[in-house]
Image (tube, helix red, strand yellow):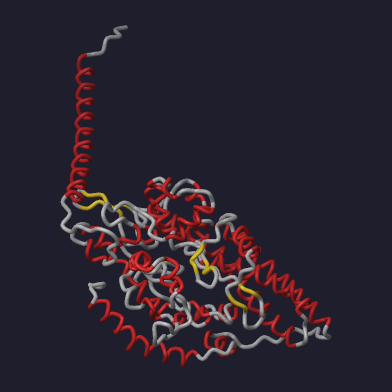
Amino acid sequence: MDKKLKSWKGWLLFAAAMVVVFVLGLCVSALMERRAETASIFNNRKTVIEGIESRNEIFKDDFPREYSTWKLTADTTFKSEYNGSAAVDVLEQRSEMVILWAGYAFAKDYSTPRGHMHAVEDIRASLRTGAPTTANDGPQPGTCWACKSPDVPRMMQEVGVDSFYAHKWAAWGDQIVNPIGCADCHDATTMNLHISRPALIEAFQRQGKDINDATPQEMRSLVCAQCHVEYYFKGDGKYLTFPWDKGFTVEDMEAYYDENKYYDYINKISKAPILKAQHPDYEVAQMGIHGQRGVSCADCHMPYKTEGGMKFSDHHVQSPLAYMDRTCLSCHRESEETLRQNVYERQRKALEIRDRLEKELAKAHIEAGFAWEKGATEQEMANVLQLIRQSQWRWDFSVATHGGSFHAPQEIERILSHGLDRALQARLAIAKVLAKHGYTDDVRMPDISTKEKAQKYIGLDIPAERAAKKKFLETTVPEWLKTAKANDRLI
């Protein structure tokens, strides 16, 4: 048998090799052109920026693609089976939450979050920030601004971190005027990702870590972790602190708070010392399969986009379900509909436990309040209050996180189920206390079927709150904006 390669086969292999070389050449050429174009942008920037530039519009001429997609965070039209980009009154949907937050500002007003472009206007409009009339008025500290604007690191640099936190919220009203944007995550000179908030750096330091050692891929999550985390206001100075010293889990943080004898407020009905979770998105994401595999927040919430031969991160930060062709389908091979239903299935299962937990926990608060009325002692109620605290912490930790039932579904369901267990234990313990005081019937539940009824039950005068806030928005806020523009802090 002739083992020599026939001439036509040789020519075929040669031609195939040439095609491969040609294609590789095109790829290299395109890559070099893209690098050259990127380098050209940075070497020929129209605007020279030094220090912290909080006015997002200043960046638009040099980074038009990023800027134009960032502006899309103002959009409120996206909606999935659960939540979306519009502000939805959660208390209207879940009136039991008013009982859980009785004695805390969240019982007045709590809506689903909108995009980054709305960050400043939404915190101004919220009933939770009150209606201050002077810089030293209002119930909230300056720390409440910490994650709302690139003006925050600018002010921290000007007045000092401690001073910024310690002032009242209204003190910075004419300073914090630009919504979450460029300087929150980028060094204005180099545009490298950087950490602009001290709380994250300090949390790493207390764990014996140096955040400067983070890889570029890790930074694509850590810039988000500056704000999308659990935190609290420590001490009289209301110093922003992440409770990560013992770890990221719900039990680790609970142990940290218990050791420091910390609570956010005393529930007005049950008298339980309550921990109010914020939004432990980064921590929960690290517990899920995507976080464990090194997928960053930006991979799914700011996917790459190609336009005019340029590859850039889409700064329209939103749900990955809004553009699945560039998020989920970058790795998965199932259809969009299959993947979407996978997400909804996880959400439904978590919500099934959440619904039950909220109802049982609200009853526990009301029954505990009834026990106090019947003459229960602090010693008798100690275990009850601890169980309510533990139950509510697990509930809040799970529901406050954005996308937790997708990021780490097994962990969220575990936490919610443990919260339900403690709520039921609390109700059983209350029944035993009531029996000691001669009461063995069921505790009559008030009508809290609507937000308004629940708020009235806990003694809130929401119409008066709304009237005061309306006046604040019509008088004080315009003055803040006028001052900011006059001092060239707002374009």
Point out residue 299 in the picture as x, y percentages from the top left corner: 38, 52
Point out residue 423 in the picture as x, y percentages from the top left corner: 68, 71
Residue 180 in view of the camera: no
Tally the numbered discs.
0
- 96 or 371, which lies in front? 371
Q: Is residue 324 above or below residue 125?
A: above
Query: Where is residue 375, by image quadrant?
Result: bottom right
Work out which residue is located at the far top of the displayed protein and give it: 1
- 265 or 209, which lies in front? 209
In-image side of 131 versus 70 (left or right): right
In-image side of 269 versus 429 (left or right): left
In-image side of 112 versus 206 (left or right): left
Residue at image coords 67%, 82%: 366
Query: Where is residue 104, by image quadrant?
Result: bottom right
Point out residue 143 in the picture as x, y percentages from the top left corner: 45, 71
- 369 or 404, which lies in front? 369
Q: Is residue 477 above or below residue 71?
A: below
Q: Which quarter of the rendering shows the N terminus? A: top left
- 83 or 381, which lies in front? 381
Q: Which quarter of the rendering shows the C terminus? A: bottom left
In-image side of 106 versus 319 (left or right): right
Residue at image coords 44%, 84%: 137
